Amino acid sequence: MNITWLELTFLALAHFRLTRLLVFDRITEFIRRPFIEEVEEEEDGEVVTYIKFKGNGLRRWIGELLSCYWCTGVWCAFFLYGAWVYWPVGTEPLVIILAIAAIGAIIESVIQKLIE
């Protein structure tokens, strides 16, 4: 299947947003909770957050996956591209929404850096 540069750009932005959504965002904490626990400790006056994996075997593996941006990113790319190829009508709106959210997140991050 041929993919245009515009489609690749949309997929890349959607990948970025979906991966961050799964690994970092509070709204998807319920997905991570069965697999990882975030432990906060105070060190030298600063609060440091550590991740503890729950369980063994598959449960631990999923916890490790969901705590690693790079690992989750590979699976998100696989999912998005596979869905794009095999179910483009249903995947296109998801990709566009995630890409728009990614652009908004990037703009917000740039603005925050500029006003600091």
Image: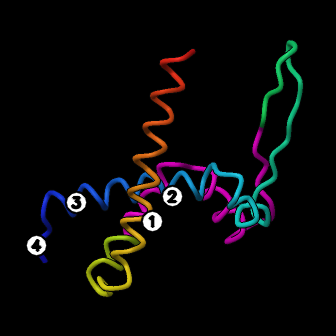
Q: Nearer the viewer, residue 41 or 108?
A: 108
How busy is the neighbourhood of tag 1: few (under 14 within 10 Å), some, or many (20 plus)?
A: some
Q: Secondary structure at mark 3?
A: helix
**Residue range of the region highlighted in magenta in the rendering:** 50-78
Q: Residue beneath label 3, please?
A: 8
The residue that disc 2 covers is 72
Drawn side of residue 60 relative to residue 114, left or right? right
Circles 1 and 2: CB atoms closer than 8 Å: yes
Q: Are marks 1 and 3 in contact (CB under 8 Å)?
A: no
Residue 91 figure quarter? bottom left
Toward the viewer: 107 or 38?
107
Gap in angstroms between the C-alphas marked 3 and 4: 10 Å
Q: Residue at x 57, y 56 (%)?
A: 21
Q: Quadrant of residue 11?
A: bottom left
Q: Earlier in the sequence, mark 1 or mark 3?
A: 3
Q: Position of residue 51 (x, y in %)?
A: 75, 45
Q: Closer to the N terminus: mark 4 or mark 1?
A: 4
